[in-house]
Amino acid sequence: MTTAPAGRQHWRKVGAWDTVCDGDRLICAACGTLVRSYQYRCHPPESAMFERCVGLAWCSGCRIYSGSVVHVPRKRSLVDALASLPGEQRERLVRSESRLVEFLDCQTRDSRG
């Protein structure tokens, strides 16, 4: 079981939630937080399934996220936010959407300084 940081609730998966467009960004309608997103490939380049990827979107303020299978063209490169991690840690994160979202959210907060 994943534990949330002290004083924070656990991440909750939802099918969808209300968002508002702000130019090319999405904002959570409930709390006004910028909606973050991440896509990653599950299949090797030689696989016919290579273009089927996992897409995650989350609101740090509400601690909610959604995940779905998304199509990403073969020629489009995706940023690998887990590239610097040891293989075992990477695998552990990919096996749990909520852990992965927590990790990505922390990375996002850390990069904003």
Image: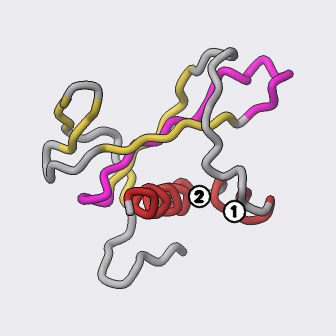
Q: Position of residue 21 (x, y in %)?
A: 20, 29
Compared across the picture, whether 73 is left or right of 64 comes to right
Colouring style:
secondary structure
Q: In the image, is residue 32 above or below residue 23? A: below
Task: Tell me if residue 113 is in the magenta stretch.
Answer: no
Q: Residue furthest front?
A: 113
Q: Position of residue 23 (x, y in %)?
A: 22, 25
Pick the quarter of the image with the C terminus.
bottom left
Q: In the image, is residue 17 above or below residue 104? A: above
Q: Position of residue 106 (x, y in %)?
A: 46, 63
* Residue in the image at 17% along x and 33% along y: 20
Instruction: Label 1: state its secondary structure.
Output: helix
Number of the label disc, if any, that sits on residue 92? 1
Task: Tell me if residue 59 is in the magenta stretch.
Answer: yes
Magenta-highlighted residues: 43-63
* Residue in the image at 38% along x and 57% along y: 112
Compared across the picture, whether 90 is left or right of 54 comes to right
Name the kind of residue labelled 1 in the image. Answer: Arg
Q: Which residue is mark 2?
A: 96
In the rendered image, which quarter is residue 41 located in? top right
Q: In front here: 70 or 21?
A: 21
Q: What is the spatial separation of the Cα atoms under label 2 and label 1, in whole angstroms?
A: 7 Å
Q: Are marks 2 and 1 in contact (CB under 8 Å)?
A: yes
In the rendered image, which quarter is residue 90 located in? bottom right
Q: In the image, is residue 64 above or below residue 41? A: below
Q: Position of residue 54 (x, y in %)?
A: 57, 36
How many numbered circles does the render carry? 2
Q: In front here: 31 or 18?
A: 31
Pick the quarter of the image with the N terminus.
bottom right
* Residue in the image at 15% along x and 48% along y: 32
